[in-house]
Amino acid sequence: MADLTSNFIGIKSPNPFWLASAPPTDKEYNVRRAFEAGWGGVVWKTLGSEGPPIVNVSGPRYGAIWGSDRRLMGLNNIELITDRPLEVNLREIKSVKRDYPDRALVISLMVPCDEESWKDILKRIEDTEADGVELNFGCPHGMAERGMGSAVGQVPEYIEMVTRWVKQYSRMPCIVKLTPNVTSILPPAMAAKRGGADAVSLINTVKSITNVDLDAFSPFPTIDGKGSHGGYCGPAVKPIALNMVAEIARHHETRGLPISGIGGVTTWRDAAEFMALGSGNVQVCTAAMTYGFKVVQEMISGLSQYLDEKEMALSDLVGRAVPNFVEWQDLNLNYVTKARIDQDACIKCGRCYAACEDTSHQAIAMKPGRVFEVKDDECVACNLCVNVCPVENCITMETLPLGALDERTGRRVEPYANWTTHPNNPMAVKAAE
């Protein structure tokens, strides 16, 4: 099997799969079970200072979004940082690290935004022998209202300031966890880098309301007739996370800043996509909460097999797709594809026809016997038919060389005229070149 040994900012672990700071990493019992299941590391659930006690709700803490097959697509979480005493957490962290020296153990921190509070908690965690700290600048609920979490993560100047304090008062590698609840992820990432962060992790949860009880007229989860916004996570946030990770990986001011990717990692393939877009490792939460800790075993075996088949080292995968992530105007407008329907695989459901006829370019004809064929002259290769077809690989996109004779139409292949010749299209000149 491929070697999955990870060295992320000097923190070594047997594989790049870490559990994210969240309910699964709240106590020693959970973390020991996670390590026994095979996780390479954990980020301990966020610790706070010994100020006013953290009190979580004793009613429901999660809202959910499901797919049509009841598969969990996303969780809305209103749980706060740990409500267990700081000294208990620190004692358990030290015990776990002593017994699992080969695993990564990072401590997530969130305290008030003043220098003394950070100096104090950093001093108290030094003797745990943990491998690093992660600064929770992302939590969008509960703590943000107290001037912490995403309230800090949305202000680049605060990120830089606190990161400098942490680097000044701690020997540990410092990971800054970024919030997605911003217009652009780049200013916060740049601020973390200026402050001396060894890495960033992202994304934290997305501020959200998943659904509303239409009898009680209250958002879920409902606590005594009332609801609140929470943090959304799970497979549904993966596209948002991938984009933000890639933006940091490719930007000239943040390129080279190590990234721990978070957001909807459920399979080895998800993890590989994050790594290809620049993540040095990945953190997982919702998948473990849905399927249990042993889900990591599929991730390990799947990624190992993929790397073996590609004859690629883990380090070669990291950032492999970043050069191919470009701005829209840098796409090749002379690249032409057309949809093709495999008649043997087609189940004649008509979804492709309905979608294209009603909402796209009227490029699919329905012939007698419910036979569906693509009209090349009208097809703009939008890919909608591929995405709505319920049969995998029944509809595919065929690349046609520019200038070649299309045997189906008897015409030479040209770019779609509306894109390349419209007078209001600023790319028309470039496409013509």
Image (cartoon, grey):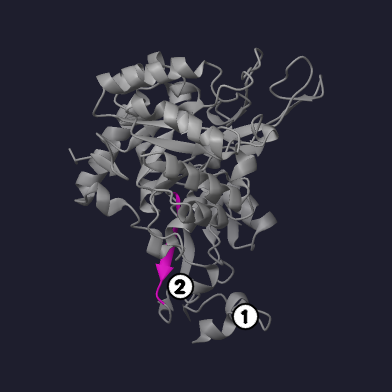
Q: Is residue 83 visible?
A: yes
Majority secondary structure of magenta residues: strand
User: Would you place residue 77 above or below residue 55 in this image?
Assistant: below
Residue 336 vs residue 39, the one in the foreground:
39
Q: In the displayed image of the protein, which residue is found farthest to the front?
A: 116
The span from disc 2 to disc 1 (Cα, nearest Å) is 17 Å
| Any part of residue 264 in sight | no
Q: Is residue 372 magenta?
A: no
Q: Quadrant of the N terminus?
A: top left
Label located before the other in sequence (2 or 1): 2
Provide residue 341's location: percent of width, then percent of height: 47, 55
Q: Is residue 395 magenta?
A: yes
Q: Where does the magenta region start and end?
A: 394-401
- Residue beneath the point at 52% across and 77% down: 415
Q: Quadrant of residue 329?
A: bottom right
**Residue type at the position of mark 1:** Pro
Q: Amino acid at mark 2?
A: Tyr
Q: Where is residue 86 drawn, in percent x and y?
A: 49, 19
**Closer to us: 32 or 358:** 32
* Residue at which label 1 appears: 426
Q: Position of residue 121 (x, y in %)?
A: 48, 29
Q: Compared with residue 317, is residue 131 higher up or lower down, i.e. above or below?
A: above
Name the secondary structure under disc 1. Answer: loop
